[in-house]
Image (cartoon, coloured by chain):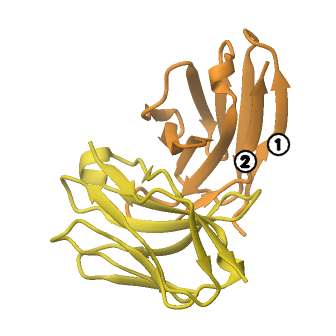
Chain colours: A orange, B yellow
Amino acid sequence: DAGITQSPRHKVTETGTPVTLRCHQTENHRYMYWYRQDPGHGLRLIHYSYGVKDTDKGEVSDGYSVSRSKTEDFLLTLESATSSQTSVYFCAIREDGGNTEAFFGQGTRLTVV
Amino acid sequence: GDSVTQMEGPVTLSEEAFLTINCTYTATGYPSLFWYVQYPGEGLQLLLKATKADDKGSNKGFEATYRKETTSFHLEKGSVQVSDSAVYFCALSDPVDSGYALNFGKGTSLLVTP
């Protein structure tokens, strides 16, 4: 199995509080992604990174920010959580951006109350 | 931008039935195409892929052929098992048009009954 770990696995937080989710990899892959999974929407890309300090927005980036200061860590921050951000969040890694396989973490279930 | 459309689910089949899950895509470049599977409570894992037109990806009895003329990548299996019950996602990667993103369809839930 690819070495990819998400933390925390579950979190309940209150509306308006900041939340940071962490994705850690031991594969030294260049590309890292954050997705959210919601019923009826499948997986939607939030942000991705193609190197240290190199990030770009996905289709649902509003309300989210990311940082990648080291190859192995990709952080997703909800600056002020809202109920619409209740979701399951998945991190994925890829060796390159073309035709290589993406490996997924186990997911983080976030509930904003 | 690039996009993936796959058939709505859920799909319910009896064991040993034939499976087809349709997937079509829109892309301006020459994307690579993937099928991922998600078992309950888990992350996604690659099922198969194809990187150019007319390529056939196959794994665990599943197959899909990259059809550029119909912009399709339909998933098929000749005889499904109860253990195939999962959610299946079609995805594409198109560095020319979408940079390094990996874009997914909405997923198709499959339930196989004994």
Chain letter of mark 1 equals: A
| Amino acid on which the number 2 mark rests in the picture | Gly
* Residue at numbered disc 1: A9
What percent of the width, then of the height, locates residue A82? Answer: 67, 16
Spatial CA distance of label 1 from label 2 is 6 Å
Same chain for mark 1 and mark 2? The answer is: yes
Labels 1 and 2 touching (C-beta < 8 A): yes
Q: Residue at x 30, y 53 (%)?
A: B95
In the image, taking residue B64 as reference, residue B19 lies left or right, namely right
Where residue B28 appears, as percent x and y from the top left, is 18, 52
Please tell me which residue lies in front, A106 or B12. Answer: B12
Residue B14: numbered disc: none
Residue A89 placement, left or right of B75: right
Instruction: Give the percent coordinates (x, y) of residue B11.
Output: 55, 66
Image quadrant holding the C terminus of chain B, namely: bottom right
Residue B15 position within the rendered picture, expressed as x and y whole percent measured from the top left: 65, 86
Q: Quadrant of the N terminus of chain B?
A: top left
Instruction: Residue A100: tell me if it is visible.
Output: no
Mark before the other along the chain sequence, 1 or 2? 1
At a point 41% along the width and 56% down the height, the residue shown is A97
Q: Is residue B71 above or below residue A49?
A: below
Residue at the image point whose x is 50% and y is 41% from the top? A44
Can you tell which mark lies on residue A107?
A: 2
| Front residue (pair B76, B1) | B76
Q: Amino acid at mark 1?
A: Arg
Q: Residue at x 48, y 68 (%)?
A: B35
Q: Is residue B73 left or right of residue A50?
A: left
Q: Quadrant of residue A96?
A: bottom left
Rate crowding at label 1 as few (under 14), some (14 to 19) or many (20 or more) other CA atoms within 10 Å.
some
Residue A42, placed above or below residue A54: below
Question: Is A97 drawn above or below residue A80 in the view shown?
Answer: below
